[in-house]
Image: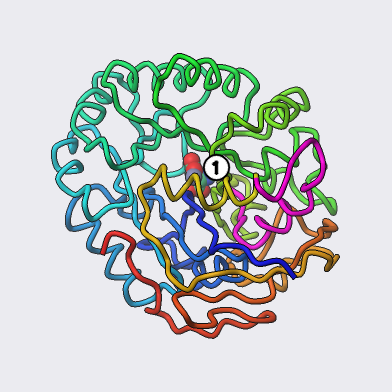
Amino acid sequence: MIKLPGLIDPHVHLREPGATHKEDFDSGTSAALAGGITMVLAMPNTKPPIFDADTLDLALNAAKQKARCDYGQFVGAGPDNAIMAASLADKAAGLKMYLDSTFGELRLNDMTLWQPHFANYPKNYPLVAHSESRSMAAAILFAAIYDRPVHIAHISLKEEILLIKAAKEKGIKVTCEVCPHHLFMTSSSPSGRGQGEGRMEVRPRLATQTDVDALWGNLDVIDCFATDHAPHTLEEKDSDNPPPGFPGLETFLPLILTAVDHQNFTMDDVIKKMYTNPKKIFNLPDQPETWVEVDENASYEIRAEEQFTRCGWTPFEGWKVRGKVRKVVLRGKTAFEDGRIFVKPGYGKNIRG
Ligand code: NCD
Ligand code: ZN
């Protein structure tokens, strides 16, 4: 048995308000606990999107009633809410800027719309950019010009990790996260069990083996791991217009633990990238008396039917992994043990509360 700190997932989509048939604060935070995660930061591309005081309250009220682990809620950067968003910084997990195509309505195409956000959002709180390839380069330039930190969500490409490495060497305040699916799958990974290609739709798209090798070859440049848990139902994924996104909360730690001891990857890296670094980058509070017990030798196959997520599937169905979460203690209380959740909806606390 190994003991880990309560893990942090800084990038999850819990679909509340507006799409609770995919997930809600209850099912999503149950999935988090089952995955050894005691703190989640929720993205704002909901219906309606979270972009002002009223919509932030809508999400935070739902979370307060329903969340079983601790949580924060991002505010989305819109075309004309920079001052408003900055004024909410004490209540929000951070500011999320969608600079590339995504699921939902929040997208800033024109760079003049980026400026007020980089200029106004308080520097002690995180500004997270969904920005791929050349727009990622632009986001890093904005961070340099406005002399503030920027965190790049879900990087997946060789050109991205190499540019971030170079930017860090120049002292630019850029950090980044990588998702398990971009570390363990490529665009030629089989979609599994003869299912439709819609299941493999995800943003950023799965990349090439060269890209995957570049991520593993530059592990020290990766600050955090994050799931980008983006649940959509199987019916939606197998439809003619499949939305992009994979669930990931319950497969996060087992996939990562299975990779330990390969490619110079150690338990120290796991703790740094799933606890120490995200805590620092996202300015997150301590969780006293909180830990995760993992049976590191338990080998098993991933099964969607055993998961708490409401979406009902996983792209990792049938994968053989090593390392099972046995018990999660959150603020002194057993929250999860041997497949069962023991804390009630509402036990979770707002990390900016
Ligand atoms: C995300 C979603 O479904 O909300 N999908 C995804 O493929 N990652 C949107 C996003 O993170 O851009
Ligand atoms: Zn996302």
Quadrant, the C terminus: bottom left
* Magenta stretch holds residue 260: yes
Report the predominant secondary structure element of the magenta stretch. Answer: loop
**Type of amino acid at the residue the image marks with label 1:** Cys
Image spot of residue 199 (x, y percent): 69, 48
Secondary structure category for the residue under label 1: strand
Q: Which of 166 and 152 is in front in this view?
A: 166
Residue that appears at 59% across and 24% down: 161
* Figure quadrant of residue 144: top left
Q: Name the residue under label 1.
A: 224
Q: Is residue 326 left or right of residue 169?
A: right
* Figure quadrant of residue 163: top right
Q: In this view, does 106 lie to the left or right of 321?
A: left
Image spot of residue 45 (x, y percent): 38, 48
Colour theme: rainbow
Q: Which of 234 and 240 is in front in this view?
A: 234
Residue that appears at 64% across and 76% down: 327
Image spot of residue 178 (x, y percent): 59, 39
Boundaries of the magenta span: 244-268
Q: Which of 194 and 220 is in front in this view?
A: 220
Quadrant, the N terminus: bottom right
Residue that appears at 47% across and 32% down: 175
